[in-house]
Amino acid sequence: MVPGAVGKVALMRLLPGTRALITGASRGIGAALARELARRGAVVGVAARSTGELDALVASLPGDGHLALECDVASRASVGAALERFVAPAGGRDRLVAHAGIPHYEPFLDAPVEAAERMTQVNWLGTVYTVHAGLEPMVAAGAGHVVVVSSGAALRAFPSAAVYGATKAAQRAFAEALRHELHGTGVSLTTVYPGEIATSLHDHEKDRMPAWYRGGPGAASADVLAAKILAAVEADDRALFFPPWVRLLGILNGATPRAADLVLRRLRGSAAAPRRD
């Protein structure tokens, strides 16, 4: 740790041996973060339900001591057990990344209510369970950093993603308040707002993706985002928006939703904002 300026949290530099646990790490942004952390000498715990993918990821990481942790973040007991399995050999944790999340893009009245329940359990309650289980020991140690991976949908939700956007907005409100609550503890928090990233997040629902969606292989890079997340943590940034247009959309929507709708209609077509009022 390198002391920061007076009145700021002590900044947690990523040094060899830094201990980091990531939920939702079997693929996408979580896996990219694991690779970047391990490349820089961290000991990484990767948690997800897909143990086969986790084992393959751990086997590919440079360095020693990395752990694959079977974990369903929708279960508070499963999250607690996963963190314990990581802490025992690692001796603690310095970074905690709440990344696990699932989408279900479909008009609200067409989607099964079970999809809304599952997104709430994984995206929102999974974040609560992860941070609650991992935060207290870091506060007791007087050092650490939490990363909550939200979404650009937390700033402006889109048609066919009403519930998904709601779960991400819940993460946003939680993280913004918690960062202030952690003042003076030596622990800090950064919220990440990704836009469309080139991952397999929507592979299960490609046949129903809305017309405004612009993701896929040509979208922003998860590896670039991972490096930017670590830089944001080391700088103790309040938030990271990637790509940068995500921040601009949030500012515009907060100031004048009508103007945001107009911009989105021009950029993404009427499906992004079909109602004109």
Image (cartoon, rainbow, N blue to C red):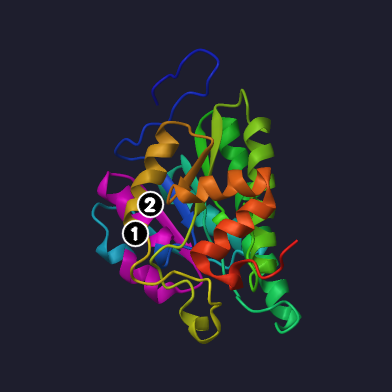
Q: Is residue 45 magenta?
A: yes
Residue range in magenta is 29-57
Instruction: Give the residue number, with chain letter if any, for mark 1.
Output: 221
Number of numbered tags placed on the structure image: 2
The residue closer to the viewer here, 83 or 169, is: 169
The residue closer to the viewer here, 240 or 160, is: 160
Looking at the rendered image, the quarter that the N terminus falls into is: top left
Residue 54 place in picture, x, y as percent: 39, 68
Is residue 192 in view?
no
Side of 179 relative to 3 (left or right):
right
Dot 1: element: loop
Instruction: Give the residue number, with chain letter if any, for mark 2.
Output: 225
Residue 39 place in picture, x, y as percent: 26, 49
Q: Are marks 2 and 1 in contact (CB under 8 Å)?
A: yes
* Above-or-below relation of 213 to 254: below
Residue 89 place in picture, x, y as percent: 42, 50
Q: Residue at x 31, y 56 (%)?
A: 35
Q: Mark number for residue 128? A: none
Side of 179 relative to 235 (left or right):
right
Secondary structure character of the magenta stretch overall: helix
Residue 151 place in picture, x, y as percent: 55, 56
The residue closer to the viewer here, 150 or 132, is: 150
Side of 174 relative to 144 (left or right):
right
Q: Residue at x 51, y 67 (%)?
A: 268
Looking at the rendered image, the quarter that the C terminus falls into is: bottom right
Q: Residue at x 66, y 31 (%)?
A: 180
Q: Amino acid at mark 1?
A: Ser
Dot 2: element: helix
Q: Is residue 182 magenta?
A: no
Q: Amino acid at mark 2?
A: Leu
